[in-house]
Amino acid sequence: MQFNHQSAVVTGAGVGIGFELCRRLVLDGASVILNDIDPHLAASAAKKINEEAGADRCISIAGDTGEIEIIKSLVGQAVERFGKLDIVIANAGITLFGDFLNYKPEAFYRVLQVNLGGSFFLTQQAAQVMKGQESGGSILLMSSVTGHQAHRNLAAYGMTKAALEMLVKNLVIELSPLRININAVAPGATLKERTIGDEGYEKTWSRITPMGRPATTKDIADAALFLVSNNARHITGQSLVVDGGWTSVSPEPF
Ligand SMILES: NC(=O)c1ccc[n+]([C@@H]2O[C@H](COP(=O)([O-])OP(=O)(O)OC[C@H]3O[C@@H](n4cnc5c(N)ncnc54)[C@H](O)[C@@H]3O)[C@@H](O)[C@H]2O)c1
C-alpha cells in the first residue's frame, strides 16, 4: 500500500493508461479523482475500480481538461474531498493524425489546447495547492516517443510531447523550492482497449520493437507510479522513455 493516505488526480482516465494508473493508485491505498471527457466512461471506470478495491476512494469528475474551469474543479474537488493533493498525473492527450501540408488550424489548436494547455494549467493549479503543503507533491506529465522521434502524420502531436518534456525541465526552477518534483513518462506503442485484439498493430510493433512486443498499460503504469512514489523523491526534471528500446536504434541498412 505504497500510496496509503495519498490523494491524487489523474486526467483522461476512463480507459487506457490513465485507467490503469487510477486502478493501481486506488489498490495501493490512494484516494483518486478520475477524470475523463466522457461522463459515462468516467463514472463506469470509477465504479469498476471501487468494486475491485472494495473501497470508495475513486471519484469520477467528467470534463474537458482543455478547459481551465474543469482543471480548477479537479484540483478543488481533490482538496475538498481528501483534504490535500499529493499526486497529479496529466495523462489526457489527444492524437489528431494528418499530413503537415494539409493540417487544419482547428486540429492544430485543439491538440495544443488539450496536450499542452491541459497539462500546463493542471500543473499550475496543482502547484498552487502543493506549495502550501509541508510534504509538497509530485507531478507527472504524459509524453510520448513521438516527442523524441519523427512519426509520420504526427507533427503537431509530437511537437506537444517534446514541449511537455521541456516544461518538466523548466519547472524544476520554480517547483523544487516548493518541495514539488515533476517528471515525464514517454510511452512507446502501448496496447490498450482500442488496440488489444488488433492483430496488425500488435504484430507490427512486435516486429519493430527490440524487446519484441508493444508495451502494456502495466508497463507504463509501473514506470509512472515509480516517478510519483516516495522512492523517486529526489528525481525531478526527467523524462523516462518506456518503449522496449524502439527509440534507441536507427533503421538498419539490411
Ligand atoms: N497508447 C499509446 O500507445 C500511447 C503512446 C504514447 C503516449 N501516449 C500518451 O498517453 C496518454 C494516454 O494515452 P491512452 O492511449 O491511454 O489514452 P486514450 O487515447 O485511450 O484516451 C484515454 C481517455 O482520455 C479521454 N480524453 C480525451 N480527451 C480528453 C480531454 N480533453 N479531457 C479529458 N479526457 C479526455 C478519452 O475519452 C479516453 O477515455 C496520452 O497523453 C497519450 O498521448 C499513449
Image (cartoon, rainbow, N blue to C red):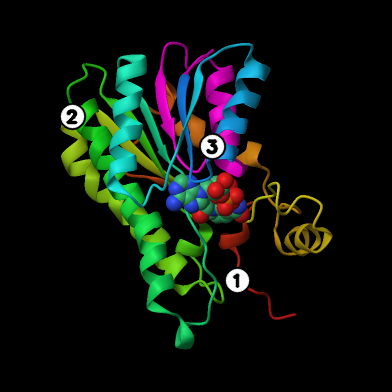
The reply, left or right, for residue 162 in relation to residue 21 is left
Q: Which of marks 2 and 3 is nearer the N terminus?
A: 2
Closer to the camera in the image, 145 or 78: 78
Q: Name the residue under label 3.
A: 223
Q: Is residue 9 above or below residue 57?
A: below
The structure residue drawn at horizontal position 21% and vertical position 36%, both measured from the top left corner, is 175
Question: Does the CB distance between marks 1 and 2 fall below 8 Å?
Answer: no
Q: Name the residue under label 1.
A: 250
Residue type, numbered disc 3:
Ala
Q: Quadrant of the C terminus?
A: bottom right
Check disc 2 and report its element: helix, strand or loop. helix
Q: Earlier in the sequence, mark 1 or mark 2?
A: 2
Task: Report the Cα–Cα distance between label 1 and label 2.
Answer: 40 Å
The structure residue drawn at horizontal position 32% and vertical position 40%, both measured from the top left corner, is 71
Residue 242 x, y percent position in the rendering:
57, 48
Q: Mark 2 points at which residue?
A: 178
Give yes or no for residue 137 being in the magenta stretch: no
Question: Does the CB distance between marks 1 and 3 fall below 8 Å?
Answer: no
Q: Is residue 3 above or below residue 166?
A: above
Closer to the camera in the image, 90 or 210: 90
User: Can you see residue 190?
Assistant: yes
Res. 204 image quadrant: bottom right
Residue 33 x, y percent position in the rendering:
44, 28
Residue type, numbered disc 2:
Leu
The mark lying in front, picked from 1 and 3, is 3
The residue range painted magenta reads: 1-30
Closer to the camera in the image, 244 or 201: 201
The structure residue drawn at horizontal position 28% and vertical position 46%, both measured from the top left corner, is 68
